[in-house]
Amino acid sequence: MQLYELAKEVDLTSAEVAKLLGREGQSAHVTTVTEDDQEIVRATVKADAKPDIEASEVVRFVSAKQSHMVPFDGGRTKQYLRFENFSFVAERGSKQAKAIAELGSSEIKTVKDEPYEDEDERARFDKYIRGRCYPGLSGQEFAMNAGMHFLQAVLSPEEMSSASSPGAAIQRILATKSFEEMI
């Protein structure tokens, strides 16, 4: 399948699909897209287009880096999965989700839709989240733009839209989220 055909199918421009695949500047009419690339694009578009998707159907990963690339075996060519604004969302059980989970990177966390029960773990989680959002010396100055993106990476779009401030978003995270991996 050609890149422009995939773009039509998922209702994006060829440039948007090329950007998702890390192939900016390539001609849409001569660029062939592998089946794995097609799956990546479809999963990304599906996750972005379906805000009412059940939490059990997707897995949300957050990275310590705002822009992070993870190697992914795309068949004949080596490809990369891109975290944008700290976030990567994939269908649960997909090749992409398995590839990220198998990395075992301390910089990547899997978001769970349940809070920490242990108070010490919850306190470490609170300190970590606040440190990502408020990097100032006092820890309570102003929320950095990157900090807001990190909060958006942890929460679903619906959850983030109902939070009236960074503090409210943090409280929602503490009440409803945890990381599968230890902090």
Image (tube, grey):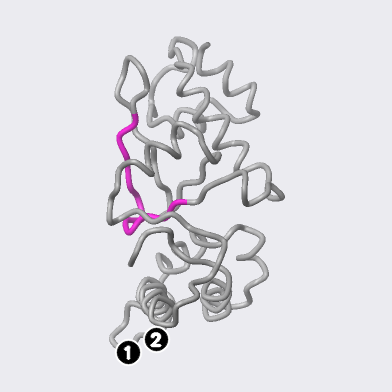
Residue lying furthest front: 118
Residue in the picture at 35% in, 53% down: 108
Q: 171 or 177: nearer the eye? A: 177
Q: Where is residue 36 in the image (x, y as percent from the top left)?
A: 46, 22
* Magenta span includes 94: no
Residue 138's mark? 1
Magenta stretch secondary structure, dominant: strand
Determine the secondary structure under disc 2: loop
Q: 73 or 168: nearer the eye? A: 73
**Which residues are the magenta region?**
61-72
Q: In this view, does 76 lie to the left or right of 12?
A: left
Residue lying furthest bottom: 138
Pointer 2: what residue? 141
Q: Are marks 2 and 1 in contact (CB under 8 Å)?
A: yes
Near mark 1 (Cα within 10 A), the count class, few <14, some 14-19 or many ≥20, is few
Q: Where is residue 134 in the image (x, y as percent from the top left)?
A: 38, 78
> As shown in the figure, which amino acid type bears the numbered disc 1?
Ser
Q: How far apart are marks 2 and 1 (CA)?
A: 6 Å
Q: Position of residue 150 (x, y in %)?
A: 44, 63
